Amino acid sequence: MSPLVIGLTGGIGAGKSTAANLLKECGANVIDVDEIGRDLLHKDGDAREKIMKQFGSSILISSGEIDRKKLGRIVFSDSGHLEQLEAISHPAINRVLKTLIGEQGSGIVILDMAILVEKQLAYFAGAPMYHKVVVIESPTGLRVNRLLQRGLSEKEIEERIGAQATDAERAQAADYVIRNSGSVEGLRRAIKNFWELVEIWRIDHTNDCMDRESGNR
Ligand code: ADP
């Protein structure tokens, strides 16, 4: 039986990772897709080599590692460079995800991923690996304040928000939207309500899987 896979997305600073942690408390297995992307830079020799070839040795630090901050500055200030990086990283991330999801049992898997509506990330053979999409939304002003506290400059925040989809585009792809405009306690309550729906989705998914396995579909 395959797990129910839910893509969890939201604009930077909306509270996606906070929501992912709360979903973990409910019993979900959370896969941090952005972390897989970060890990590629030092764990996937092939991807690392291609990135170095594409962006030159100036992105390396003295130990020979890729300087993530430098790479971030290059790709977030030029959409062409971002596309070049994603042409290397996304297929590699998709391969890792295919394996990780395949290793899960019949539970609920949350893919914590900033980029969902924008690109074919978490895709296999031309189709998404997730069955449902949940979006975390927060007013832009709140997001900017949170990101300033995280140490990003106003310019970096503007570039990163500009490189992502809009709330309207995300909402269009969403099966469910969670608004995170109050306290973390408020978010916890919203996640608890959402989890009741997830349990229903899981039952439907299990029934679908059983129908397919018994040849009814
Ligand atoms: P994202 O993963 O969407 O970029 P995070 O979950 O990392 O966002 O949240 C950004 C920052 O805002 C974090 O420091 C987090 O603790 C804080 N945060 C998230 N939701 C709330 C909330 N409802 N109230 C106060 N702080 C919040």
Image (tube, rainbow, N blue to C red):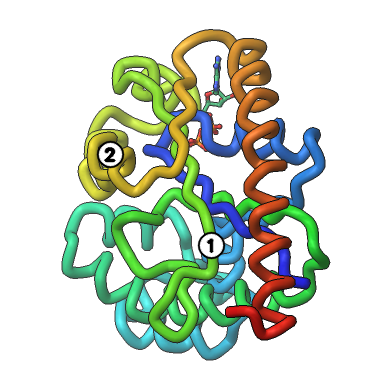
How far from the left and from the top, in percent, is residue 111?
A: 59, 55
Q: Is residue 45 left or right of residue 50?
A: right
Q: CA distance from mark 2 to mark 1?
A: 24 Å
Point out the image quarter for the C terminus.
Answer: bottom right
Residue depicted at x 67% and y 20%: 188
Residue depicted at x 17% and y 68%: 80
Front in this rendered view, residue 56 or 194 = 194
Point out the image quarter for the N terminus.
Answer: bottom right
Residue identifier under label 1: 130
Q: Neighbour class for label 1 at 10 Å: few (<14), some, many (≥20)?
A: some
Say if disc 1 is inside 8 Å of ligand 1.
Answer: no
Q: Relative to residue 180, is residue 135 depicted above or below?
A: below
Residue 161: assigned label: 2
Q: Neighbour class for label 2 at 10 Å: few (<14), some, many (≥20)?
A: some
Specify which label sits upstream in the sequence, 2 or 1.
1
Of discs 2 and 1, which sits in the foreground? Answer: 1
Looking at the rendered structure, the kind of residue marked 1 is Tyr
Looking at the rendered structure, the kind of residue marked 2 is Ile
Residue depicted at x 76% and y 40%: 24
Q: Is residue 98 left or right of residue 89?
A: right
How far from the left and from the top, in percent, is residue 81?
A: 23, 69
